[in-house]
């Protein structure tokens, strides 16, 4: 049995679906796996749609702005919870590092990833925990798949005496960003870069869990956790050109007064449906970009300032760099005519390296 230790319970589409994707890839390879269902009380409190006991101004603002959507957000939360319980195969719930350590020997292998599991910044990552470095006695093979330090990679050197001994016990390491590869190589840790697991699956794999169509009329989807003015302006531009309504699926306080209606009763399965059935997707999110590509939808990924390196690299390798643009360079007509036939071929070649890494790392189990 393989245990997967990752962020899977945050009410975040990318985190939820990357766990499904990695588990599905392992199943296709013939391995049985389960998500190690670890979630501290601190992380549980941070991810609630409406924080029950706010301690920061940010949480108070979130509560005030979300009160009008209370019932819909409760439905959204249930959709995420149902997904975790019914779509993902998980272990019993563990609230402490000690509980996980006590059951670690149940696994022949533990895979860490794919998310910012190695970002130990308490401000940026409420789920941050040294457990994701497997800080307990080694009983099994240890692998990371597309793990990430996030921005914390700049701070990591200060804490090497803490986590480096744990990393040295890994049998194979892959990360999802070049910055992670460069850093680990610089301290003598062999590693390679791997694709986000969501990119390893085809639309048919997601069709198996995709919810039915949610909106009968034709529509444009706007999706970005950073719902800035560039994203909003672009969505409105596409709406004018295509003469279609736009829907925003991100809860307040983001884009509070943007004039775009919200549809918030959208869990991971419904998120797939919203992308699959959209006439056009406007996003600035990596997973918004990845799933729009998977479902072969007309879309644009909006750049504000410096482009996200993961999106830039992925789209360049797929021949889709023209989809990653600033708002003033959006060509809706050109995006509507995208030919995805060559993208499929390039994606297959791109996946091979990541899948080969997993096969090598798991050989002999």
Image: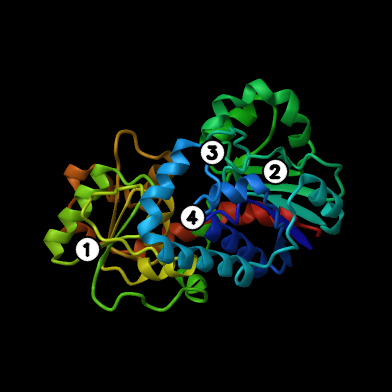
Question: Which circle marks residue 49 in the picture?
Answer: 4
Q: Residue at x 74, y 56 (%)?
A: 362
Q: Nearer the viewer, mark 3 or mark 1?
A: 3
Answer above or below: position of 63 versus 33.
above
For the residues labelled 4 and 2, say whether their Cβ atoms are less than 8 Å apart. no
Characterize the local packing of mark 1: few (<14), some (14-19) or many (20 or more) Cα atoms within 10 angstroms.
Answer: some
Q: Residue at x 63, y 22 (%)?
A: 157
Q: Is residue 184 visible?
A: yes
Characterize the local packing of mark 2: few (<14), some (14-19) or many (20 or more) Cα atoms within 10 angstroms.
Answer: many
**Residue at label 3?**
55
Q: Residue 280, located in which quarter of the rendered image? A: bottom left
| Along the viewing direction, whichever of 353 and 76 lies nearer the viewer | 76
For the residues labelled 2 and 3, say whether their Cβ atoms are less than 8 Å apart. no
Coordinates of residue 333 in the picture (x, y in percent): 16, 60
As measured in the structure, the alpha-carbon distance from the residue carrying label 4 to the one carrying label 1 is: 35 Å
Q: Nearer the viewer, mark 4 or mark 2?
A: 4
């Amino acid at each position: 049995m393989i245990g997967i230790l990752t962020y899977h319970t945050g009410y975040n589409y990318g985190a939820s679906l990357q766990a499904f994707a990695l588990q599905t890839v392992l199943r296709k390879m013939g391995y049985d796996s389960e998500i190690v269902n670890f979630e501290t009380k601190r992380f549980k409190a941070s991810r609630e749609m409406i924080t029950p006991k706010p301690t920061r101004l940010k949480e108070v603002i979130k509560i005030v702005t979300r009160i009008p959507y209370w019932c819909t957000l409760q439905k959204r939360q249930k959709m995420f919870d149902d997904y975790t319980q019914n779509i993902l195969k998980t272990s019993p719930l563990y609230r402490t590092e000690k509980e996980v350590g006590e059951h670690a020997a149940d696994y022949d292998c533990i895979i860490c990833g794919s998310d910012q599991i190695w970002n130990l910044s308490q401000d940026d990552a409420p789920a941050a925990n040294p457990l994701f470095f497997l800080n307990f006695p080694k009983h099994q093979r240890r692998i990371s798949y597309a793990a990430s330090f996030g921005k914390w990679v700049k701070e990591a050197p200060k804490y090497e005496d803490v986590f480096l001994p744990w990393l040295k016990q890994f049998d194979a390491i892959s990360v999802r960003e070049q910055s992670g590869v460069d850093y680990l190589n610089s301290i003598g840790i062999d590693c390679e870069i791997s694709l986000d697991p969501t990119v390893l699956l085809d639309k048919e794999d997601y069709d198996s869990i995709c919810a039915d169509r949610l909106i009968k009329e034709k529509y444009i989807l706007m999706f970005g956790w950073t719902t800035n003015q560039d994203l909003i302006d672009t969505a409105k531009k596409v709406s004018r050109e295509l003469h279609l309504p736009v829907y925003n699926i991100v809860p307040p306080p983001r884009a509070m007064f943007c004039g775009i209606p919200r549809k918030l009763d959208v869990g991971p399965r419904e998120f797939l449906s919203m992308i699959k059935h959209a006439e056009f997707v406007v996003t600035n999110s990596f997973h918004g970009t990845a799933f729009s590509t998977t479902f072969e939808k007309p879309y644009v990924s909006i750049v504000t300032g410096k482009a996200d390196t993961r999106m830039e690299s992925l789209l360049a390798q797929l021949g889709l760099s023209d989809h990653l643009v600033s708002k003033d360079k959006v060509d809706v007509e050109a995006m509507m005519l995208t030919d995805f036939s060559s993208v499929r071929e390039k994606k297959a070649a791109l996946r091979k390296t990541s899948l080969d890494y997993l096969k090598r790392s798991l050989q002999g189990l």
